Amino acid sequence: MSISQIQPSLEFKSQAKKAIFSIVFFAIAYALLLTFAVGLTVLCIYAGIYLVTALPGLVTLALGIGVASSGLFILMFLLKFIFKSHTIDRSHLVEINRKDEPELFSMIEEIVTEVGTDFPKKVYLSGDVNASVFYDSSFWSMFFPIRKNLQIGLGLINTISKIELKAILAHEFGHFSQKTMKLGSYVYNVNHVIYNLLYDNDSYDNLIQKWANISSYFSIFVVVAVKIIAAIQWCLRKLYDVVNRNYLGLSREMEFQADEIAAYITGYKPLANALLRMSLSEHAFNSVLSFYDERVEQNVKTNNIYREHLYVVQLLANRSNIPQTNGLPLVPLEELNRYNKSKLVIEDQWSSHPSTEDRVEKLKLTGIEFNNEEFIPAMNIFKNSSFIEETMTNKIFSNVKYPSEPSLIDINEFKTQFQNDFYSNSFPEIFNGYYDSKSPKRYNSIPLDSLENTVPIESLFSDYNVGLIYKEIAIRNDIEVLKQINDKSLKIKTFDYDGKKYSRKEVKSLLPKIQNDLKSLNDKIELNDKAIYLFFNKLSKEQNTTSHLISLYEEFEIFDKEFDTKYELYTQLSGLLNFTYETLPFEKILENFQHIKPIEEKLKNAIKDLLTSKHYKEEITPELKEKLELYLSKNWEYFGREKYLDYNLTVLFTALNNYAYLLSRGYFLIKKNLLTYQLDLVTRSMIT
């Protein structure tokens, strides 16, 4: 079977028909709105002329002009998108050509020939972990052919093999060959039109406001026009939902078809392996960026972020016991599902891509396997990979504003600092993530004779028991979602739970069953928590340190009880300050700031407690302390002379966010202190 024989699935054809229908529906609806506006404009102009000629005078002249202008403003509103120009920002991209990178372009040429599509108009490199097809779309591109561009992320190339790169490019060129890509251009332009009419109205609003200010007679009809425009915008929002929901359904089917095309070129495994590694690679890349974000004030940067990116990928893979071949992790499908234990499936109508799990399962169903399991790094495809890596690194850092000329750190210094950061922000590996989302528990009522029957530590923190924790979290979340479906705050008619389809009416009968499952699961977790407590209690008795272990538990329990109350202060004040992002009358703004004054006093007292607490001593840097003390130094005013005092607001928000950070950090550290001591008990027991 050849690629040309791949036939769209019935679901693909169905979604394509829906997408076409929705675009036609939008065109008809917009034409009707435009016809209405033209008719209304003609009627308003006629009424204005009639009013002036029937009752000549200054008042009727003003009223006649006002009537005529209301129709014109409505028509202008519906046509203003035509005069709006827009450009695509490519400042983060680097264009490459055949002369510079012959091997990459030869690979592209080979894939283009096999897929039977056109060579891309341009090929770009970006810095991130991604690959995509895009085109220069404009209003006229809906009527004339357009050539597509290819964008490849260097962060992606950095963590895949050559054969996986070929599979990913084959997927992207699979999109090139899809006739339905033309629908994407239509949808893009429809969305551009709707966005312009719904949100890009500053110039238009200023124009009609100036017109209304000329005369009170004009303002009457401006209000009328605005009311009619609001009704038109309501219609446009509904049209947006129809167009995008149907297109996104097609987009998901297009992903499956492009995957199938890639499988016919490289076999299914290379693309499946790359997809499974993608999340790990993205997480590693973002971790490296965060590492340097935290060091901007220290004037530290790198000249090659991609060596560090690859190192972090390997570090995270080792941490999770993921096997590697030639430095590239082979992420199993089970690893993606380790933390996602939900049995509730609701079709995401607003997702343009199917899940990685669904894509991998569909790829496996093709059954196409080639003998090409080589793991030559894809970065070797470049003539001078170091030059490319350094060029993209400089582009990534080009917009970062350093206090002075930054210094470079080498890869060894990065490894040392990153590892220190990584392990200082992680719980001991022996706990296998068991406490990442739960707290240690102490049980005073357990009989002491139970100490003789403790369970081995490997069993206490096994993958099975860690899985119980995430199942419990998933079931609690599922219950909350089902409650929202039941009370109609989440407008879902049908859903799948544990492989069976249900309607909204069946939620009431389903919930008690799930709640029983939750109780049963909690009983299992509690049984394991008791075994854990017994295990460490026994070790502490053998080492005569029980009192210290108990004191660490008590210290954590006190902090744990107080944490929610203290953090609620941050949540409450953040919510009350949301009005600063809205347009409100001055009196209302002043009233709102008066309302938060008592809560601010509580915040200041809480910050003072943090500054003097032993738990945060090492976490409060001189810079952080200076910012908090600045906020405490006086009673700040945040609004005056009919405008916000931006500097003062920055002082408030900085203090509020630092307060939340310190609270969360303190919670982590006091939990880690207990867990580290338990690790020490295990270590000492092994020595003796």
Image (cartoon, grey):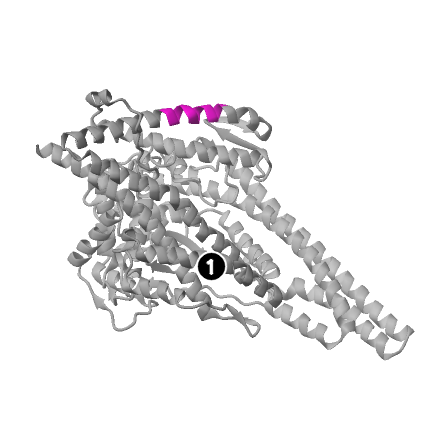
Question: Is residue 222 or residue 13 the one in the foreground?
Answer: 222
Res 555 quadrant in image = top left
Q: Is residue 66 left or right of residue 127?
A: right
Residue at the extreme bottom = 58
SS at mark 1 in the image: helix
Residue at the extreme right = 54
Q: Is residue 161 above or below residue 479?
A: below
Q: Is residue 586 above or below residue 255?
A: below
| Label 1 sits on residue | 600
Question: Is residue 544 or residue 627 the one in the foreground?
Answer: 544
Q: Is residue 121 visible?
A: no
Extent of the magenta region: 513-523
The local crowd at label 1, few if under 14, some if 14 to 19, many if 20 or more residues have their Cα within 10 Å, is some
- Location of residue 268 in the rendering, given as x and y in whole percent from the top left corner: 33, 37
Most common SS among magenta residues: helix
The N terminus lies in quadrant: top left
The amino acid at mark 1 is: Glu
